[in-house]
Amino acid sequence: MKRPRRLSLALLAPPMCLITLACTGSSDGHSTSQAGQGGAPATTPQAGQGGPPATSGANNAGGSAGGGGGSAGGGPMLDVLLVDDFEDGDDRPLIPGEWYGYVDTDSGGLSTLSFTGAAAGVVAMNGAGFQSQKSLEVSYTFDKGTSKIDPYAGFGAAIGSDTVPYDLANYTGVSYTYQGGAHRVQVQVTDVTDYDDFGINLPASPAWKTVNVPFQTFAQEGWGVKTQLDLRHVKNIAFALKGLAGTSGGLKVDNLVLTRSVGPAVPDMTIRAAAPPADETLDSIEIDNPLQAKAMKYLSRGYNVTNWLEETRFTGFTYDESFVGKLAAAGFRSLRLPIDFDLYVTSTTGMGDSLAITVSDDLWQILDAFDTWTQAHGLSLTIDYHQYGTLPDVASPDSVQTAVLMWGQVAAHFAKSTREDLFFELMNEPELSFGGTDPTQAEWGAIAERMIAAIRATDSTHSIIFGDVAWYGIDKLVSRKPLADKNVIYAFHDYEPFIFTHQGASWANLGSAHGLPYPYDPARWSEYYAGLGFNAGMEPWLLSALKNYYRDGSRSALRNHILSAKRWAVTNGVPVICNEFGAYEGTSELADRARYLRDMVGVFQELQIPWQQWFMIMAADGSVIPEYRQALQLDE
């Protein structure tokens, strides 16, 4: 990624203000205590005395955060350095530095960012404040332009540089009050040179909300070079904004302070004894449908080929026949090939019912190769239409029709194939695949029926795989009636307990999470959010999952949820499969991941549900570490 374009740049040194923040329980109360020593650049012993008492900033920070209040909760007294209360309205914080904005122009994007009440390219603070006169307020629009990455914008305070960084080693976190869009607050340090900066994602809030975020919960997003956060080397305190093309929003920030703990911490949670739920029962798991036996025969012990064709257009075989052969030798029996069909539409003509598409021969080169290789090595093949929010869009009928026509062409291409173990998966996780507004369950069901009709126009034999909305969620699947076509296998994805399987995953807002055991173990738990990499500013459902983990971090909790899918399958006489599950290796322990995989596979075997694991766990040489081999029962 290229360096984001800044709107302005200048470094000045106004006075520094130090106040004290009291945090008790869920209160967002702020109180003025004293003026004191300010922060200092790393190259100087101190920044001198901090000017007059911060009466304006402290008083403006007072009170609750209204309906959106959410401090760190139960924390100690916090000694804080006021970075900016924005009351002077200018582009300079109250410590040495300067505010700036940036957009994605250098990456080919056309996103915009503007500061309220300021001319284009000018930084000023004119937003309505939180119990004060002014705040920093920006408005933004996201436009991908010609960029190959998602659109972005943002703003920040430049308080240091590569040669003269700012030393924040004496501070333990950052606190501010905000209202508006979701964002990522970052501490950018000189040690990170590829923009994989340390930060944490915070959700949108329609009401003013105060957050106190410990630096120990900041983490990189994971796509750059991993490094350690060194707070002696700070360049910027930044607020990054990302979103889907065509969307827009706004964000107000007030009372930005750096915090330093000066008292004993009050626990955020209670360490409880493990209390897994009782196992639910099902009278029978028998399904009198030939598709059940077919699914069990061909779709279990599955492997997903990830982070390749669902992300980028084909330029060559990153994974070739030797890879397929190694999968078979390792004990896998099925291969799911996620691929973004849209990338191979070279042209369209007409519109509506007259719409026609032309497809690149590259698509047939890929699919024919994997068709040949999987047959040769005894693996089934699932062709999975899998993408990340580009097409279709419910609001654009022609984009939906393009997706329907793509399946018509793929089915026609394989219509003469006699292999029984070739499967067509209509579209992975509709929320992930559709641009614009997420489709409702009814909308997705209607589109799926159109895709099936396009397939059946030339291919009446190959089985189709369908997953529902809510990220292929079990709860949505079991709320619907089966589709009209009788040759459909129903899929769900299961990553529960999510805070365990995705700890360390920045894309899931859990980049800072760490140390969660599986199953739950009170001896390895913490009374504090920060002890597990969480903070009170995170989305409420994540904090709820953390507090309920003593119950949900168990085999019986996993089994009961999966059992509901099997109950629906038995009731309707159709097979269900789980073609995505697994645990990200970011910050979880290998022994915990192995226990989780063992329990999941054990449940699938008990309930006769075929499975395909998502995270690629086979090494380039074809080896699978013993812990995974045993957990997945690859040698049996």
Image: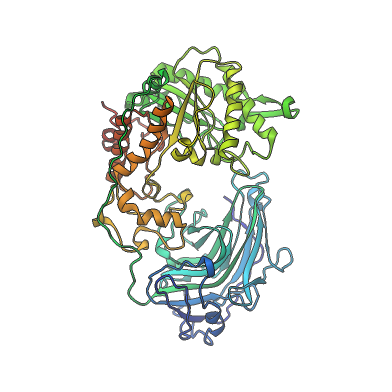
Task: Using the image as rendered, state which of residue 632 and residue 431 is in the foreground.
Answer: 431
Task: Using the image as rendered, state which of residue 46 and residue 438 is in the foreground.
Answer: 438
Residue 398 x/y as whole percent: 70, 33
| Residue projecting furthest to the bottom | 52
Specify the quadrant of the image occupied by residue 547. bottom left
| Residue projecting furthest to the right | 350
Q: Is residue 503 visible?
A: yes
Q: Is residue 224 visible?
A: no
Residue 455 x/y as whole percent: 58, 21
Image quarter hosting the C terminus: top left
Specify the quadrant of the image occupied by residue 153. bottom right
Task: Using the image as rendered, state which of residue 370 and residue 27 is in the foreground.
Answer: 27
How is the structure coloured here?
Answer: rainbow
Residue 3 x/y as whole percent: 59, 55
608 relative to 538 in the view: left or right: left
The residue at the point 67 percent across, 72 percent down is: 126
Residue 198 x/y as whole percent: 47, 59
| Depicted 261 relative to depicted 413: above or below | below
Task: Using the image as rendered, state which of residue 125 and residue 423 is in the foreground.
Answer: 423
